[in-house]
Every structure is written in structure tokens, then in C-alpha cells.
Amino acid sequence: MKRPAFIFLIFILASSCISNKRITYLQNLPGNEEINLDEFIPFAAVDYKYVLQPFDIVDIDFASSDPELTEAFEFQGARNMRGGGMMGGAGGGGGDLFFFTGYSIDEKGYVEIPKLGKIKISGLTEEEAKDVVQEAINVYFKDDVFVRLRMAGIRYTTLGEFGSSGTKVILRNRATIFDALAASGESNILAKRNKLFIIRHYDGGTKIHQINLNDRALLNSPFYFIQNNDILYLEPMKIRQFGNADNLSSGLQLFGTFLASALLLIGLLTN
């Protein structure tokens, strides 16, 4: 084989390799203020509180010294499921307990509670929504029934180069982007970690944001924490066309063999 052809082959194979810089999380990237180990990093939105939106699901509990008082404000089916402890894999996005036992906010921002009727809670924080429901229930029982309202977990969807794509539920009231990655089987080596797209819902519409998982500055980003109903999409690298993460090695070997054979044939024909 002629030397130029051999050099070209080496160049192609080398360009197919994936640099560690493209797959390593939280690096100090050029152009950004350096963040050292053990350095305190304040959150970008330390006072942020999630505002409830239409189609969210909230968990509302009622407590009283007289159990018969609280039964009037709960659906019978939901109460039975709570008592039976039917979690059904809610943490992994399979069966979701709160889909059946929680209160869904409709498109106009209302939840419907037995005896109390429809109460608008969209546009409010958890604490504000709790106060609104508590005021409504105090009309019937002054200081006898207490209300607890909270988000029924954080639901988000992963698409693209994740270990596991689909809708997930994290049973917490706050979760980071890395919590979401871990719950989704992390991203594979063929993902463009410097280009994670977040499709986020806002009042009246959505926005597409892009973050860099390789950049340590993400820790001080407003997108460090995921929100309910976020959609996370990871694009594949161009090398993805030669195989997925599981068979990348085989794909590269096949590609290298094919290219070497083609260059060998060209070399023989040009001699």
C-alpha cells in the first residue's frame, strides 16, 4: 500500500475515536471562570420555588383527630389504594401511585376535591396552594382538619442517547440534572454531552434550552435543577451511524476493515 493511502487510513481511524473531553462531566472549560474542588458554589436560583401548572399532579392529604371528617374530602378509590400501599414502581416510571391517588390539575388550573368542588391552584407555589385548600376546608371544619399539599414527584421524559428513554418519576420535590441522568441509566458514550436540550414548559407555552454537561459552570446554572414535565433530549455524535454504544467497537472494526480493503484495492489498481 502506498504511504499516502496508509496515512489516510490512520487519519480516518483516529478521527473515529472519542476524546475524553467529550464524555467527561463537569470540566473547567476555557472561557469560563474556573471552579476549584471544594469551592462553594451558590445555586443560581436559591430562592426558586416551583409554580404549579395545568396537568401537574399534586398529592393532598387531610389529617384530623376524627378520621370520619377527612373521609368526606377523599375519593373512595384513592383512599383504598393508599391504604393498600400500591406504589407500583412509581420511582421508575412504571405504575404511578399518584396518577391514581393524586389530584390532577386540569387545563384551566383547577383541582376537584370532594365536597369542596373545584379550586384553582395553578400559578401558585406548593405552600400557597396548600393555604388555598386549607381556607376552603375551614369553611366546613374550623381548625379541625389540616391539609398537606405537595407535588406528587417530578416527572420528566428522556429521549435520544440515554441508557433508558421514556417517562420517569423522581419522588422528591427537587432533583438535579444528574439525578435525572442517573435515574435514566446515564448517557452513553455516543451522546453529545455538550448539547443536552431541555424542553421546558412555561405558562402558555414552551422553550428549548441547551446546556453543556461537560461544563462545571452548569452547577451555577438555572438549569441545574430539573422541573416537572421537562423533556431531556441528547443528540448522537456523527459516529453513531456506525453503531450504538454497545456495538461501537464492532462497528469501528468493520469500518476499518472495509476501508483498509478499499484502499488496498485502490493501491493495487493504481500500481
Image: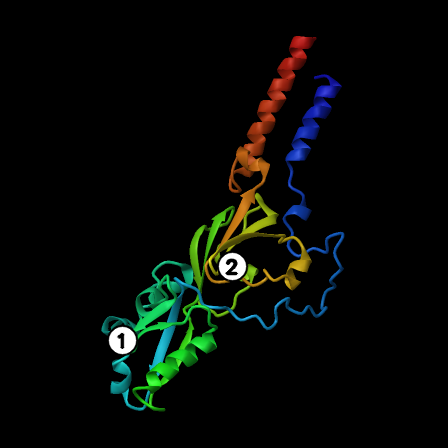
Q: How many marks?
A: 2
Asked whether 28 or 12 is in front, the reply is 28
Q: Nearer the viewer, residue 9 or 191?
A: 191
- Quadrant placement of the N terminus: top right
**Where does residue 173 sit, x and y in percent of width and height?**
48, 70
Spatial CA distance of label 2 from label 1 is 35 Å
Image coords of residue 31 (percent x, y)? 76, 53
In front here: 202 or 16? 202
- Point out which mark residue 114 bears: 1
Viewer-nearest residue: 35 or 186: 35
Quarter where residue 42 is shown: bottom right
Which kind of residue does numbered mark 1 sit on?
A: Pro
Circle 2: is it few (<14), some (14-19), or many (20+) Cα within 10 Å? many
User: 36 above or below 31?
Assistant: below
Q: Which mark is residue 180?
A: 2
Amino acid type of the residue that numbered disc 2 sits on in the rendered structure: Ala
